[in-house]
């Protein structure tokens, strides 16, 4: 028997976590309906975000109390995505200009999961909500274009946008 290397282990943990997340969501939807599952999912994400951000920032040596500028936001996002992004998650992100973060989802693993459980039409994006909750927990001033309500991929056929920060 061989032990998985660090990358394989990280990918396994991400897959297991996302499977748990999907199973939890599906259980909530089956028991209480999609509206309640969306609300509960967002409440859980909002609770998790500050804890997750503190851990990520500690790991990359960025102080949690008071982000001084965009370089610290970039560092935090880079490390966070290294930790939580699985190879099956087909999204990219970059920094097209100072104080801006851009994302593009090629294929949404969460929305595809919703198709499997029958929640496609009512699903509200938890993926981007998680990122925005990180930013909120840091007290950052930012705008999102286009605004994300519901699911951009389902509503427009494309999930891409820009987060602009004001410091």
Image (spheres, rainbow, N blue to C red):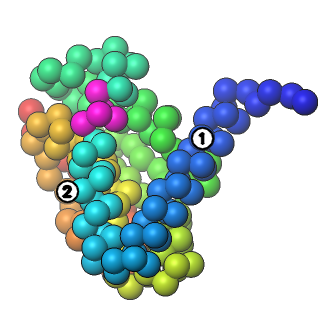
Q: Is residue 98 left or right of residue 116?
A: left
Extent of the magenta region: 50-54
Circle 1 is placed at which residue position?
A: 13
Q: CA distance from mark 2 to mark 1?
A: 30 Å
Q: Which is the main secondary structure of the residues drawn in magenta?
A: helix
At a point 30% along the width and 53% down the height, the residue shown is 44
Residue lying furthest front: 31
Q: Residue 53 magenta-drawn? A: yes
Image quarter where the C terminus lies is: top left
Q: Is residue 77 above or below residue 32?
A: above
Classed neighbour count for the residue bearing mark 1: other residues with Cα under 10 Å, few (<14), some (14–19), many (≥20): some
- On the image, the x and y values in percent for residue 65 come to 15, 21
In terms of image quadrants, where is residue 69? top left
Q: Which residue shows up at 18% across the image and 39% down it?
A: 137
Relative image position of residue 35 (x, y in whole percent): 28, 77
Label 2 secondary element? strand
Q: Is residue 88 magenta?
A: no
The numbered dot on residue 68 is: none
Q: Position of residue 157 (x, y in %)?
A: 42, 78
Q: Residues within 10 Å of mark 2 (few under 14, many from 20)?
A: some
**Picture quarter containing residue 28?**
bottom left
Residue, x 60% and y 40% (percent of image)?
13
Badge nearest the viewer, 2 or 1 = 1
Q: Is residue 21 left or right of residue 125?
A: right
Left or right, 37 with reference to 157: left
Mark 1: secondary structure: helix
Evaluate whether residue 107 shows in this view.
yes
Q: Is residue 9 above or below residue 47?
A: above
Marks counted in the figure total 2
Numbered badge on residue 144: 2
Question: Does the rendering let one see residue 157?
Answer: no
Up-down relation of residue 72 to residue 88 (above or below): above
């Amino acid at each position: 028997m061989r032990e998985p290397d660090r990358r394989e282990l990280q990918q396994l943990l991400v897959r297991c976590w996302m499977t748990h997340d999907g199973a939890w969501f599906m259980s909530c939807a089956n028991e209480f309906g999609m509206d309640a599952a969306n609300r509960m999912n967002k409440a859980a994400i909002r609770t998790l975000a500050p804890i997750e951000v503190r851990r990520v920032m500690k790991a990359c040596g960025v102080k949690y109390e008071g982000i001084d500028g965009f370089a610290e936001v970039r560092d935090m996002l880079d490390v966070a995505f290294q930790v939580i992004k699985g190879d099956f998650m087909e999204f990219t992100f970059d920094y097209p200009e100072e104080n801006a973060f851009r994302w593009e989802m090629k294929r949404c693993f969460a929305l595809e999961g919703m198709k499997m459980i029958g929640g496609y039409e009512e699903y509200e994006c938890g993926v981007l909500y998680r990122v925005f909750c990180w930013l909120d927990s840091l007290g950052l001033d930012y705008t999102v274009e286009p605004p994300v309500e519901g699911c951009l991929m389902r509503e427009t056929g494309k999930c891409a946008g820009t987060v602009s920060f004001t410091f």
